[in-house]
Image (spheres, helix red, strand yellow):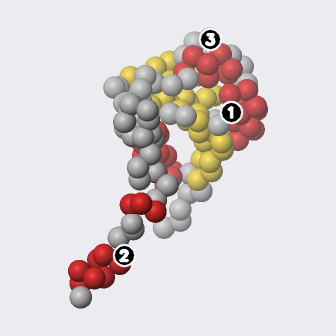
Amino acid sequence: MSLAVSTFLTPDPALTATAHATTAHGAPAHQHPPQPPRDEPLPQAGADQLLRAIACTDPQVQVDAAELRQVICHAPAGRYTILTFTTQTGTRAWLDEAEPYGGTYLVGDRWTVIAAPDLLTDLRTQVGGHLEGHHTRSP
C-alpha cells in the first residue's frame, strides 16, 4: 500500500514542463547559476557617503572591529552615531540588542545612524534607508 501511495504522489516527469528540456548540445536548458551565500561578508558599507551627507568634518572612530565600525560625528546640525557592518545579519543583531535602550534609527544596507528623529528624517532624504523606532520597556 505504501508503494502505491508513494507512486501516486510522485509527479510523472513527462508531465513537468522542464523535465526533458535540453539545449542543442544536450545540456539541461534551465540551469540556475550557483547562488552566493545569503549574507556573505562585504566591506563595510556607506560610511563615506553618510559622513558627506551629514557634513561631518571631524569623525571620531569609537569602534573599528572586523564586523562593525562605529563613528561619532558632531556636525553643524547635531550629533550623529554611524555604525557600519560587514553583513546584514550583523546589522539586525545590533538593532535587536539595542531595542531595550529605545531610540530612533535610520537603517540602510549594512549601516545604521543614530540621531534625533528630525535629523534622521532629513538624512533619509539624502541617503535612503528606513526609520526604525524602539521604545524603552518599562520593568
The residue indicated by pointer 2 is 9
Measured in 3D between alpha carbons, the distance from the residue under mark 3 to the one under mark 2, in whole angstroms, is 66 Å
Measured in 3D between alpha carbons, the distance from the residue under mark 3 to the one under mark 1, in whole angstroms, is 21 Å
- Closer to the N terminus: mark 3 or mark 1? 3
Q: Is residue 95 visible?
A: yes
Task: Identify the residue at the far top of this view.
Answer: 57
The crowd level at tag 1 (other Cα within 10 Å; few <14, some 14-19, many 20+) is some
Relative to 103, 119 lies left or right: right
Q: Is residue 9 above or below residue 127?
A: below
Task: Determine contact: label 2, label 1, CB under 8 Å.
Answer: no
Q: In x, y percent, where is residue 61?
A: 46, 20
User: In which quarter of the view is residue 24 placed?
Assistant: top left
The residue indicated by pointer 1 is 128
Instruction: Please state which amino acid type lies under the numbered disc 3.
Output: Thr
Which residue does the image show at 59% across and 39% down from the upper left? 107
Instruction: Please state which amino acid type lies under the numbered disc 2.
Output: Leu
- Closer to the N terminus: mark 3 or mark 2? 2
Instruction: Please state which amino acid type lies under the numbered disc 1.
Output: Gly
Task: Identify the residue at the far bottom of this view.
Answer: 1
Q: In x, y percent, where is residue 134?
A: 58, 53
Task: Identify the residue at the far front of this view.
Answer: 24
The residue indicated by pointer 3 is 57
In depth, the one of 85 and 137 nearer the eye is 85
